[in-house]
Amino acid sequence: MSDRLNNDTLTDLPAGVRRPAYDRRAVKTGIVHLGVGAFHRAHQAVYTDDVLARDASWGIVAASLRSPDTYDALQPQDGLYTLSVRSQEGEALRVIGAIRRVIVAPREIDDLLDVMADPQTRIVTLTVTEKGYCHDPATGTLNEAHPDIVHDLAYLKTPKSAPGFIIEALRRRRMAGVPPFTVLTCDNLPSNGRTVKRVLTRFAELVDPELGRFVAGEVSCPSTMVDRIVPATSDQDRERIGLSLGMDDAWPVVTEPFTQWVIEDQFPQGRPAWETSGAEFVNDVEPYEHMKLRLLNGSHSTLAYLGYLAGYETVADTMADEAFVRLIRGLMDEEVTPTLHMPPGADLTSYKDALIHRFKNPALKHRTWQIAMDGSQKLPQRLLGTLRDRLRSNAPIRRLSLGVAAWMRYVTGLDEKGAPIDVRDPMAARLNEIAERAGGSPEGLARELFAIREIFGDDLPNDPRFTGEVTANLVRLYELGAKQTVSEFRAG
Ligand code: CS2
């Protein structure tokens, strides 16, 4: 049996593998992270690992809000794991030591609340995915009927949701006279800081109006733009990385060379000097966020639905088809770029060139199915905001509306050969009912899906150009299939 990665075996790693450049025993907890998935481990934890070499006060305690899987993998490894950066040029391995401890929230509720309430904790970061905020995606307000929110408001001392944990921890800090931590969301939500602040303030108000005023007035929630493509780790990744390490790592993370983090500098309790590891601090994140959500994520979702329906397993497979590259380039240049308002000096052309290159990275097996998940939570900020801007200026929406139509075709749960699609979405049951009722009629399907207010709001379903173009594209997808629809797509 080979060794396992942990504090004792760090020195046995091969020379080419980078490892923590600091004494892990000297590290203190300064950050609590909620949602310890692959993205956090390949992004914020890496920036923080760099910082720890200069400032030991920012170690991370990371919590899973649901499953014990990450705990089971990382606890025997003292929180250590391997970051693999892969591209056509090869693979670079680095062991990250920023995570001091993993907590499984549902079974260690008090432990988690204790660390969050500890004065030493000055920042709570989050990657809980779009649905983890328990909000209404169309309006960005707290979904007060969400079962976890209903539960947490009734039993605040034993919360389940991210808003519940944060508000209970802030309530305890306030009682103890400890200043609030900064809440730093790192999810792909629109105006993510403002959205999380709105959700938290409302939640707190429902607990106690005084607490609501405190959250509104005292808690800082800077917005951020985060970017790094991090597909789910596969068994092949585990095996290959284990061979290179000469020891087992139960859960390495695999990513691309590109990484970006733009943050609003509002940290009243202090923060790590993340700029020394490449993060950019700005006054207003919004232009960068629009650029990233609309160009990268909008393209990603469009590629995911159309690519999946066309029978492509990964984004790189989809991008090996030139017709898809043309469609995506056209989407970015013709339909998204005119809606962006970038600060002087921003070079969108090279940003988009880089995106095409990143999507083509053959070393990343990023499944179209993975990106297709949770579309009901993703469409508003990825495609619908851009669509609204285009409709307002009476500009063409041919490719954007094809993206929305592809989502509609996908959520029917049956692919073009009639095989089932495993549709993962918090609204999956409702989407499935609608598809069954529509019984294969694209017009009926579109009509019922437009009526989902939480996704399309009140305006889009009443805009005949929007509904007309999406429905026409959906009819084409039914008639021709995704591959042919994309290959016959002509600019103009
Ligand atoms: C992807 C994102 O899964 C998805 O929906 O579009 O996770 C994407 O890879 C990241 O936002 C890239 O920064």
Image (cartoon, rainbow, N blue to C red):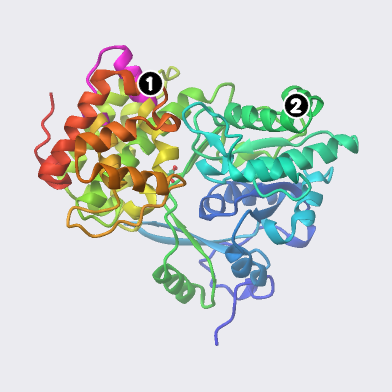
Magenta-drawn segment = 385-400
Name the quadrant containing residue 258: top left
Nearest to the observer: residue 412 or residue 297: 412
Check contact, mark 2 vs mark 1: CB within 8 A. Answer: no
| Secondary structure predominantly adopted by residues drawn in magenta | helix
In the image, taking residue 12 as reference, residue 428 lies left or right, namely left
Any mark on residue 212, and which? Answer: 2
Q: Residue at x 33, y 23 (%)?
A: 461
Q: Residue at x 31, y 28 (%)?
A: 349
User: For the point 59% across and 81% down, which residue is it?
Assistant: 3
In the depicted view, which residue is nearer to us: 218 or 345? Answer: 218
The one nearer the camera, 458 or 113, is 458
Q: Is residue 76 above or below residue 178?
A: below
Q: Quadrant of the C terminus?
A: top left
Question: Residue at 54% of width from left, 71% of height from top?
Answer: 250
Q: Which residue is mark 1?
A: 340
The question of residue 440 being in magenta is answered with no
Position of 143 with respect to 352 (left or right) is right
User: From the viewer's perspective, is 184 left or right of 242?
Assistant: right
Q: Position of residue 330 (x, y in %)?
A: 21, 30
Amino acid type assigned to the residue bearing label 1 in the image: Leu
Quadrant of the picture in which ligand 1 is shown: top left
Determine if residue 281 is in view.
Answer: no
Q: Residue furthest front?
A: 437
Q: Secondary structure at mark 1?
A: loop
Figure quadrant of the N terminus: bottom right
Which mark is first along the chain, 1 or 2? Answer: 2
**Hey, which quadrant is residue 110 in on the image?**
bottom right
